[in-house]
Image: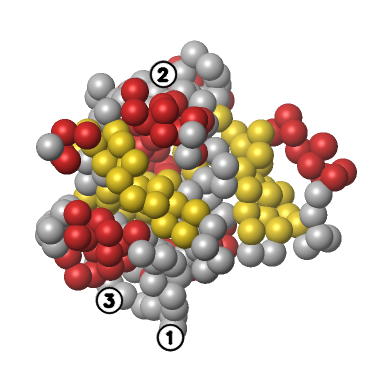
Amino acid sequence: MRRYIEFFLALNSEETRSDDPRLIDIIRKLYLMPASTEPYAFAAASLPSDGQATIVDNFFKQKTHGLFVECGAFDGQYLSNTLFLERFRAWTGLLIEPEPSNFEDLKNRHRKALIANSCLSSKPHPSEFVLRQDRALSEILDVKNISYDRETGGTGDVSYNIVQCFPFYSFLLAANITTVDYFSLDVEGQEFNVLKTIPWHRVDIKEGKAAVNAYMATTGYVDYDELADGYGTPSDVIYVRRDLLA
């Protein structure tokens, strides 16, 4: 037990491997919450995704019982990239949301998937980051940059919370996930760093800009489609494993 406590206190050490059994046990016992068995409890009205779910649904030819991971799940309903797949195609998976109030809303939606109040580490080991919340916008900051950010940014309605983040691969092991059909990643500019932590030879992701495209190409994924926001600005890119297009 003492060794376990010492490990927990040194959790964010660079020496902590993403597949360490003690780390996986901590995530499983302290961070993962099971899929709800209660009826859905949605807000009266909400916007669907910006089109990601439709593209994924068409790509998989209306596949049922698929598996997703959504990082940046917000409240589990508004602009959700996975809710349609869960409700109408019987998909399940893992929803990760770091912001505490958003996570409470997510929990109260009773999604039929694992949920975690955490974030994906942009390093290949567990790490603490600062969640900067400015009204409806959130951003993950490195702890060492927090003093500079406090001095230079914000509207006056800014809050800061330290959040514990874990590598993507650690979450998969904790959730007993071996294959991911759809990986939705929205971490406010840290996407490329998160992708670099993934041991692609151990992870089967069927569907997931210049630097990211180049990196994804080296891992066997190609740019399948790109979505724009309401102003015509590119906002999301959907990647697909190359062999699935053959």
Image quadrant occupied by the C terminus? top left
Q: Quadrant of residue 147?
A: top right
Residue underneath mark 2: 17
Amino acid under disc 1: Ala
User: Disc 2, disc 1: CB below 8 Å?
Assistant: no
Q: Callout 2: 10 Å neighbours few (<14), some, many (20+)?
A: some
Residue placed furthest toward the bottom: 44
Q: Earlier in the sequence, mark 3 or mark 2?
A: 2
Residue 19 percent across, percent down from the top left: 34, 23
Residue placed under numbered mark 1 in the picture: 44
Label 1, residues with CA under 10 Å away: few <14, some 14-19, many ≥20? few
Kind of residue indicated by mark 2: Arg
Query: Can residue 169 be seen in the rendering of this structure?
Result: yes
Q: Is residue 7 above or below residue 244?
A: above
Q: Residue at x 73, y 55 (%)?
A: 159
The secondary element bearing badge 1 is classed as loop
Q: In the image as oriented, which residue stretches furthest toward the front?
A: 232
Q: CA distance from mark 2 to mark 1?
A: 44 Å
Residue 43 percent location from the top left of the image: 44, 80
Q: From what the image shows, is residue 9 above or below residue 240?
A: above
- Whether tag 3 and tag 2 are in contact, CB under 8 A, the answer is no
- CA distance for labels 1 and 3: 15 Å
- Tell me if 227 is positioned left or right of 86 in this view: right
